Amino acid sequence: MKLVRLFSISMIAMSSAFLSACGPQEAEVQPPPAVEEVDQEAQGVETEVEQEAQGVETEVEQDAQGVETEVEQEVDPRFDALEGFTMEQRAEFEQELNTLIQDFDLRISDLEAQAATMDEATKTQLNDEIMALRQQRDLLQQQFGQLGAVTEENWEDVKTGILTAIEAFEQSVQEAESREG
């Protein structure tokens, strides 16, 4: 019986020692100073990255605006003149449009000549673009053919469709010409 009593007392003592070790601590555990320094450095890096990202976004926007300005400046000035034609000036409009189409044909021929001198990969890409340009040019020619049936009521719509096709063609030609260099 003495043994059981001794065993019980020792179990109680061990349990109380165990509980006091697992219980709440009076002092809060502080992270080592290195952790705080790393946190501060991380916040500084985040700020730098955000500032650099904003700078890059601004730079990209400025570059995009510059490209838009360049493209606008490179558009054939005759294109602007076409916008002002009225139904009464249809003959002059047709004449200017025919001249533009001939110029586009020359530019396509120049691109074909340039493609012949390029490496195979560039040549293949440029030839694909030339094929697309020819399709755009054919569409423009079809629209040109419809000018004979234009009425006063649909003049502006037909003219706008032609001008849109010219502008798209001009941009496509400029893109192809920029690849050939």
Image: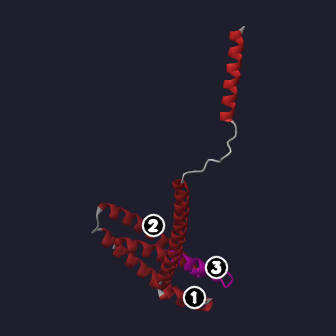
Kindly identify which residue carries mark 3.
157
Under mark 3, the amino acid is: Asp
Nearer the camera: disc 1 or disc 2:
2
Kindly identify which residue carries mark 2.
132
Q: Residues within 10 Å of mark 2 (few under 14, many from 20)?
A: some
Is 25 located above or below residue 96 in the figure? above
The picture places residue 66, in percent across and down from the top left corner, at 49, 80
Name which of mark 2 and mark 3 comes first in the sequence: 2
Nearer the camera: disc 1 or disc 3:
3
For the residues bearing labels 1 and 3, Cβ distance under 8 angstroms: no
Q: In terms of secondary structure, where does tag 2 sit?
A: helix
| Residue drawn at (68%, 34%) of the image | 20
Is 94 located above or below residue 52 in the figure? below
The picture places residue 170, in percent across and down from the top left corner, at 47, 77
Relative to 170, 149 lies left or right: right
Kindly identify which residue carries mark 1.
90
For the residues bearing labels 2 and 3, Cβ distance under 8 angstroms: no
* Residue 128 found in image quarter: bottom left
| Residue drawn at (70%, 10%) of the image | 2
Question: What's the magenta region?
Answer: 147-168
Under mark 1, the amino acid is: Arg
Q: Is residue 37 visible?
A: yes
The residue at the far left in this view is 117
